Image (tube, helix red, strand yellow):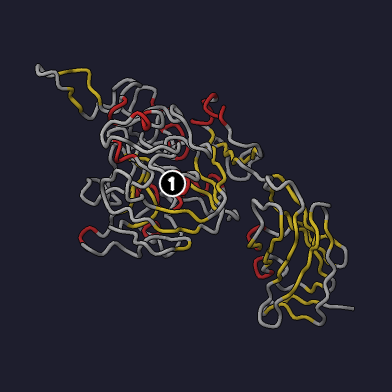
Amino acid sequence: MKRIVLTGLGMMMMGWALFVSAADEEVREVAVRQRWPWSPKVDIHYVVACDPTQRVDVAVEGFNNGASLGRLPEASLSGDVYGVSYGEHHIVWDPAQTAYSNTPLTGFSVALSLVPAKTYMIIDLSKSAGQEGQITYRTDGVWYDITNRVEHMTTNLVLRRIEPDTYIMGAPGAEIKDGMPQTQHAVTLTQPFYIGVFEFTQAQCKQIMPSYTGGFTVDGATRPAEKISYNTLRGTVAGASWPTNHDVDATSFIGLLRTKTGLKGLDLPTEAQWEYACRAGTGTGLNNGTDITNSLADGNLALLGRYKYNGGCLSSNRLDTGAVVYYEPPVTVGVTGGTARVGSYLPNAWGLYDMHGNVTEWCLDFYTNNLGAAAVIDPRGPAIWEPFLALKYLRMRRGGAYLSTAVQCRSAYRCDASASYMQAHDAPLYTGFRVVVPLPLEQ
C-alpha cells in the first residue's frame, strides 16, 4: 500500500501515488504531488471548466482511506482558492497549518468543489463572536440598494470582497496634481481582502467603543466617525509595530473589534490596498473614469463625494464684496454642510462609497515622501519615516475630506507632511477610517 505519514518534522512518503477525487463535475484533471523530501507541502493542480465570465471559490475536502477529514482550513491553503475562473489552477496545502501534522494518513486524497464567491461579508455588530448569524455573506454582484437600509450604516458592518491583481498606483503626468509626489509604479497585490463599503460611522463606533464621541452631531449616527486617532484605532504599544506585524493593543478600537468579531486579521488598509480599492480598475483621477478639470471646484467630483465646494465648507454668508466665505462648519451644522451621510454619493465600480471626500481615512503605513517608480509586491510602506525623526510617528491618510479641494480628493492624492494632523496621536475632525479583512480569514 502506498503510505504517507504526517509528522511534526514533515511529511514522510513511503510511496508517492495519491488517490484524487473530484466532487464537482466542473473540476477536472485534479493532480496532487507531494514536495517531499524537501518540504511537507502538497501541490494540488486542477482545471476549472465553467463559464469564462464566472468567478468561484474552491473548497478542499481531505480524506484518509476514504474517510473524510472535513474541509481543510482555509489558512492551510494558498494559491488559487478564491475568485478563480476558467482554466488551469494551482493550490498549495500546508499540513503544518492543520491538526494532521502529527497524524498518520495512510491513504490521503482530496475532493475539490466549487462554491459561489462570497462577494459581501455582513457583520452584525450587536452580536458577539461566534454567535449565530453574526457573520453572513452575499454572493451577488454589486449591491446597489445597500444604502436603502439604515442598519447597514449603524448596527451592521458591510464589507466588499476585492480580488487581487496588478495595478498602476500613482498619477499620470498629465493629471492635475497637488501634494506629495505620486509617481506611477506597478503594484501587485497577491491576497484577496474585504474592505468596508462605507467609512466607519459614528453609530458603528459606539457599538464597539460606547464612550466614543466626536464628529457632526446632526443626524450623526450615519455620518462617518471622526476625531479618532491612529493610536486610538490600533494602540500605542503593540499597535505601533506595523509594518513588522499586524499586532494591535487589546484595548484599542481594532483590538476590541477583533474580539467582537473573532476576525484576527481585521485592520486598516495599507496605502496600496486603499488606492487599489478606490480606483476599482480605473486609471483616471476619479474612480468613475473621469479626471478633474479644475483644481478647486469640479463637477465630476461633485457626483462622487462631499468636498469643499459642494457643501462641505461653503458658507451662505457673503462679504460686501460678494466673495463667498469658506470655513470649517461647527459640529451642529445641518446635513447639507460638513460631512455627508455615508453612501450619499455614487459608488465606484466595485460598490464602494465615499472614497473621494467626506473624511480622510487612516492607512496602516508610515508616511513617506515618494513611493518611487519601482514595481512592488504587497507593499507595507517604509519601516519608519526617517527624513525627520522628530516627525517619525506620521501615518498616511488618503481620500480627501469635506473641507478639501478637488485636487486633494483624487485617487492618487497623498497627503503632504506639511498638512496638519498626520501624527498617530492626532484626532482631527475631518479624519476617519474604514477597515479590511484579508483572506484567508484568521480566526
**Depicted 55 relative to depicted 440: above or below:** above
**In which quadrant of the rendered view does residue 306 lie?**
top left
Number of residues whose C-alpha sits closer than 10 Å to that of mark 1, classed few (under 14), some (14–19) or many (20 or more) = many
Residue at 29% across, 22% down: 333
Residue sitting farthest toward the left: 320
The residue singled out by tag 1 in the image is: 283
State the residue in front, 104 or 277: 277
Tag count: 1
State the residue in front, 79 or 108: 79
Asked whether the viewer can see residue 351, the reply is yes
**Depicted 158 relative to depicted 51: above or below:** above
Percent of width and height locating residue 363: 39, 50
State the residue in front, 261 or 404: 404
**In which quadrant of the rendered view does residue 103 lie?**
bottom right
**Depicted 285 relative to depicted 371: above or below:** above
| Lateral position of residue 120 relative to residue 34, left or right | left
Percent of width and height locating residue 152: 53, 31
Q: Give the residue type at disc 1.
A: Gly
**Depicted 92 relative to depicted 394: above or below:** below
Residue sitting farthest toward the front: 174
State the residue in front, 197 or 321: 321
Residue at 83% across, 54% down: 23
Asked whether the viewer can see residue 443, the reply is no
Quarter of the image for the N terminus: give it: bottom right
Percent of width and height locating residue 97: 65, 66
Quarter of the image for the C terminus: give it: bottom right
Percent of width and height locating residue 320: 9, 16
Q: Secondary structure at mark 1?
A: loop
Residue at 39% across, 47% down: 233
**In which quadrant of the rendered view does residue 199 lie?**
top left
